Amino acid sequence: MVSPEETLTRYRLAEGRNGKTILTLAALLLFGKDPGRWHPRCGIDFVKYEGSERRMGAELNIIKRERLEAPLTLLIEKAYETIKPHLRERQRLVDLFFEERLEYPTYAWQEAIVNAVAHRDYRYEGIGIEVWMFEDRLEIRSPGELVEPVTLERLLRRERIHASRNPRIVRVLTDFGYMRDQGEGIPRIFQAMEREGLYPPEFRLEADAVFTITLQNTVAYSSETLRWLTQFERLGLSGDQKRILAYAKEHGGDFTSRQCQDLVGIDIYTASREIKELMRKGIVKLPKKGGRVYELVPPPKSGAAVEKPPEYSALEPVLKEKGYVKNEDIRKALGASVKQATRIAARLVSAGWLRSEGNLKARRYVQGR
């Protein structure tokens, strides 16, 4: 068992001054029995409002208010336990299947709270962390400006930025399992939200030096569009690709690279790569050579024959003879290298012409349609 002295030494939470050992503020906030003695607003205020806006005076619409105070190593878990009972269960799209889930993805709202505790500016003693719950959204408000090189623009681009105002606090919370300390938190919040068909998180920095993350509980697209997306389940689309397709579906069936960039928050090169992948999978086309407007490929009419890929036609004799093909069969039939054969097999599996069986060393492919 690690002694308190060893803990303080490991995390550099104590300093020697004039022959005496002095605890740092980080030590008192993380492990002190009464951290409020050293910082009057180091806890979390949880406020639940009726409706979708804050009202004051005679129209005050606060349903629940609770001030949470504890050492930071316990405060985060206490916040989880306090807020979770107020989260409603709703039907959500999860990996293209409807399931009953909490109205906000667990990772998203919990990571936002961890970030607030770890990265807030503890020099501000007059304001603290606040979690505001409304009918349609959850706002996690944290005192302090963004720390360079972090900017709102880089957060919206989902860049992994490793920077901390409170390195000692971050290190302790990382070792306690609350964070990874690799700049992964914000990108993963985006992933968690879009995986369940929700709008991406919003960020704003207010004039009074409060940084706010807003999570909306409303579905980004209509139920009809979400059902339409299920036809592409077997193609293994990324979250960004699903958002591009959903946008096109709800905007007349076409889109541009610029719209993709603005929608997903990616640069022109990433957008080009995502669009090319959708074209390769046969979902999107560019009708006019040199044009800028991409269109959704209409599904084949019921009963219409689907054109076989030439690679599959070349493998059919082997499939009929053996009942399966392996990487070496693909190489032999198509004159391909090992890597090329692997990519060809992956494309045919994605399109449903082949089905993969077995593990990596004994993998083989059988007829999929």
Image: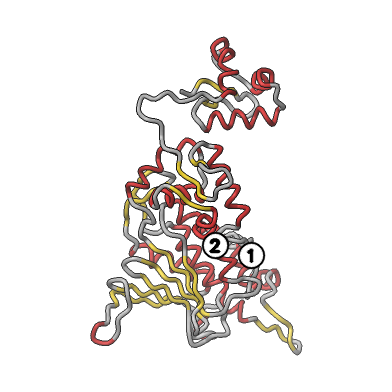
Could you tell me which residue is drawn at 57 percent across and 57 percent down?
266
Instruction: Pick whichever of labels 1 and 2 is earlier in the sequence.
Output: 1
Q: Position of residue 240 (x, y in %)?
A: 51, 51
Q: Position of residue 31 (x, y in %)?
A: 56, 74
Q: Position of residue 203 (x, y in %)?
A: 49, 70
What secondary structure is found at the residue carrying circle 2?
Answer: helix
| Viewer-closest of 187 and 70 | 187
Could you tell me which residue is drawn at 54 percent across and 57 percent down?
258
The answer to which quarter of the image holds residue 78 is bottom left
Q: State the residue lying farthest toward the left.
A: 58
Q: Residues within 10 Å of mark 1 (few under 14, many from 20)?
A: some
Q: Position of residue 64 (x, y in %)?
A: 31, 74
Could you tell me which residue is drawn at 66 percent across and 21 percent down?
334
The answer to which quarter of the image holds residue 357 is top right
Marker count (numbered): 2
107 left or right of 342 in image: left
Residue that carries the numbered disc 2 in the rendered image: 186
Q: Residue 142's mark?
A: none
- Colour logic: secondary structure
Rendered position, 112 above or below 207: above
| Viewer-closest of 337 and 182 | 337
Residue type at numbered disc 1: Ile
| Viewer-closest of 91 and 174 | 91
Dots 1, 2 in contact, CB < 8 A: yes
Q: Residues within 10 Å of mark 2 (few under 14, many from 20)?
A: many
172 left or right of 247 in image: right
Q: Residue 161's mark?
A: 1
Residue type at numbered disc 2: Ile
Q: Is residue 310 visible?
A: yes
Q: Is residue 178 visible?
A: no
Could you tell me which residue is drawn at 57 percent across and 32 percent down?
347
Distance Cα–Cα, label 1 vs label 2 = 9 Å
